[in-house]
Image: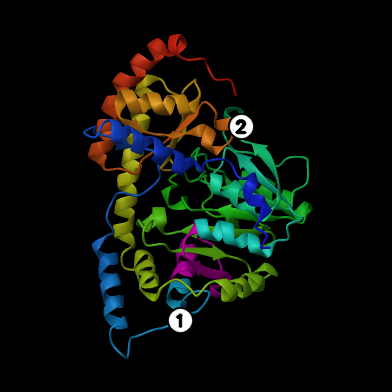
Amino acid sequence: MKKLNKNFKNLGENYLFAEIEKRVNEYKKAFPNSDLISLGIGDVTQPLPSSIVDACKDAATEMGITSGFRGYGPYDGYGFLKNAIVDYYKSRGIEINADEVFVTDGAKNGIGNILDLFDEDNTVLIPDPVYPAYVDANVISGHKIVYADATKENGFLAMPPKHKADIIYICSPNNPTGATYTPEQLKKWVDYALDNDAVILYDAAYESYITSKNAARSIFEVTGARDCAIELCSFSKMAGFTGVRCGWTIIPMVSPLNRLWLRRQAIKFNGTSYIVQRMAERALRGGFDDVQKIIKIYQKNAKTVTDKFDALGIEYTGGKNAPYIWFDCGIDSWEFFDYLLKKARIVCTPGSGFGKNGKSWVRLTSFNTPERTAEAMRRFDAFWKDFVAVRDKLFTPSKQ
């Protein structure tokens, strides 16, 4: 008789974003004419720039003629995109080699698939709160998971613990908190990884939103990182590719994981489509200014939210170097989700879905139009003042 992966039974009952969708759909069914504004799930709303759409058209035209048609592509990506990624890093003073770049169909897939390289007998260190896919992917893989607390007291930037781990997840700018490490803080993680013969899986999906000069945009800004780190990044939030799917993974040649990953990709992956890779190339070359204009829209939206929070006296992290704003609502975050949905018709993301340290915290995103973001903050202004007035009467304060 077939045997199923026993680790699936260890997963939580519901995936965070599936539960949000379920509750939103129930609300829409009950109130079909409601005007909901989503500042919850981090999906982009701006259309692809015309320069990237043109690259799509040009590549599709190539595929329609004998001289331009391409079948299976390289497992690690076409040279034109790998070299564009190399140049993107070089423009920021980071030297990498094209043989260290692997084109993928998104950072999320890379984060989960990279675990194929590691034996089940590994201890994985994950910050809390954190993007839930990190946890679920490792549960399925059967790894022992330990957590590093990221709390208000340490600025939601977990630092190395005393106990040993073999695999370390770091996300900066962080999802959900928007907190961002400096190179000096990352050096402590690199030293920890080197001391423990561990590997860092560094998720840099939101690096393009960083504006602070003292914030790290890549783990490879840190001395020693090439000996212990893998970096994963994405075009999803940089260039609006959430529905297109393209990303990259960087594994230094000094690591034996470089050849292992290529071998894994050759077995389980036939490469990202040629058309998509041409679109991604255009995002870095020729269409880069258009991409920056879209990022600036989301950055402006984040400022709209943080300006309102400043006016209301709400403490938060994120917003400046990340498209996420993270704040303490003072009650159970799922209760707050339902109340905000009912009273203001705004969709947020409950922090408890990211871990125990998010129990009373809430994430808002800047991924909407400027007009809808401004309207959401107009609603939130009135909502928050009423909520604070009744919070202690209607709800039990949440304790972390």
Q: Earlier in the sequence, mark 1 or mark 2?
A: 1
Could you tell me how far apart the alpha carbons at marks 1 and 2 are, in whole angstroms? 48 Å
| Location of mark 2 (residue) | 154
Question: What residue sits 48% from the left and 46% below the top?
Answer: 213
User: In this view, which residue lies farthest toward the bottom?
Assistant: 67
Query: What span is in magenta?
Result: 84-107
For badge 2, the amino acid type reads Asn
Of the numbered discs in the image, which one, if any, rests on residue 56?
none
- Secondary structure, mark 2, is helix
Q: Is the residue under label 2 in contact with that under label 1 (CB below 8 Å)? A: no
Residue 312's place in the image compared with 272, above or below, is above
- Secondary structure, mark 1, is loop
Q: Position of residue 388 (x, y in %)?
A: 40, 14
Question: What residue sits 30% from the left and 49% below the top?
Answer: 45
Label 2: how many residues lie within 10 Å, few (<14), some (14-19) or many (20+)? few
In the rendered image, residue 95 lying in the magenta stretch gets the answer yes
| Location of mark 1 (residue) | 72
Horizontal arrangement in the rendering, residue 104 relative to residue 56 (left or right): right
Residue 237's place in the image compared with 305, above or below, is below
In the rendered image, residue 80 lying in the magenta stretch gets the answer no
- Front residue (pair 334, 65): 334
Horizontal arrangement in the rendering, residue 220 relative to residue 395 (left or right): right
Horizontal arrangement in the rendering, residue 137 relative to residue 342 (left or right): right
Q: Position of residue 258 (x, y in %)?
A: 64, 70
Indicate the quadrant where residue 310 lies.
Answer: top left
- Front residue (pair 342, 360): 342
Question: What residue sits 38% from the left and 16% below the top?
Answer: 387
Q: Position of residue 108 (x, y in %)?
A: 51, 56
